[in-house]
Amino acid sequence: MASNKLNTGALWIGEGITTFNEATLPLAGQLGMFFEKDGKKYQLVKLTTGVAGAAGQAVWWHDFDDFVVNNDISQLTTARNQPAGVILGTVTVGNHCFIQVRGPYATVKTNGDDDIAAGDTLIIAATTDGTVDSVLAGTASTFVPFGIATAADVDAADTVAAILTMPLNGA
């Protein structure tokens, strides 16, 4: 993991974190930076080749040092143990975006198994692009936790409310 302190200094956000979808960063040196607002922590990253990003998709680290994330299940190798965060809006493959890395998030995409209960540990899913699966509450996970479900999953939408708790890269 990158070791520089990236939660200090100014960060250009533009129109907002949910619409940030930039091929080139407006200010050099911002990639990987964090900011906090309303009990949530966000990080500026780049979405590598794969599938277009959408709000609520889970991403994992593709390149720790260059702050590159991925959401393409066909490129998932050991990355189930490298959760990065949740995409906040529509993102073009190869562009920069903000992800949420800590705090409550209401609609994390699930793999559609419809088996997540409040208190379950969320992990990167191995079957569907940009989704999470779960480990039953009270059961030891063999994967690094993505977060904790705060409610049962919403079957019709294949989403779950969660508190994001994954390790930070660069903090």
Image (cartoon, rainbow, N blue to C red):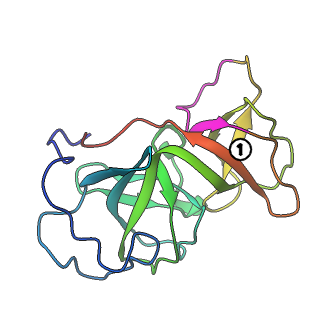
In the displayed structure, 107 sits above or below 46; it is above
Residue 126 x/y as whole percent? 66, 49
Residue 135 x/y as whole percent? 72, 30
User: Residue, x 21% and y 47% (percent of image)?
Assistant: 7
Residue reaching furthest to the front: 38
User: Residue, x 50% and y 36% (percent of image)?
Assistant: 165
> Picture quarter containing residue 140?
top right
Is 68 positioned to the left or the right of 106 in the image? left
The residue singled out by tag 1 in the image is 133
Q: Foreground residue, 88 or 96?
A: 88
> Picture quarter containing residue 3?
top left
Q: Main secondary structure of the magenta part?
A: loop
In the displayed structure, 121 sits above or below 6; it is above
Is 88 positioned to the left or the right of 98 in the image? right
Residue 48 x/y as whole percent? 39, 68
Within 10 Å of the Cα at label 1, are there few (<14), some (14-19), or many (20+) other Cα atoms?
many
Query: Range of the magenta residues?
Result: 140-150
| Circle 1 SS class | strand
Amino acid bearing label 1: Asp
Locate the C terminus by quadrant: top left
Q: Foreground residue, 54 or 127?
A: 54
In the displayed structure, 14 sits above or below 74; it is below
Q: Is residue 27 magenta?
A: no
Is 119 positioned to the left or the right of 114 in the image? left
In the displayed structure, 5 sits above or below 58; it is above
Q: Foreground residue, 2 or 38?
A: 38
Locate the N terminus by quadrant: top left
User: Residue, x 31% and y 42% (percent of image)?
Assistant: 169
User: Residue, x 30% and y 52% (percent of image)?
Assistant: 35
Number of labels in the image equals: 1
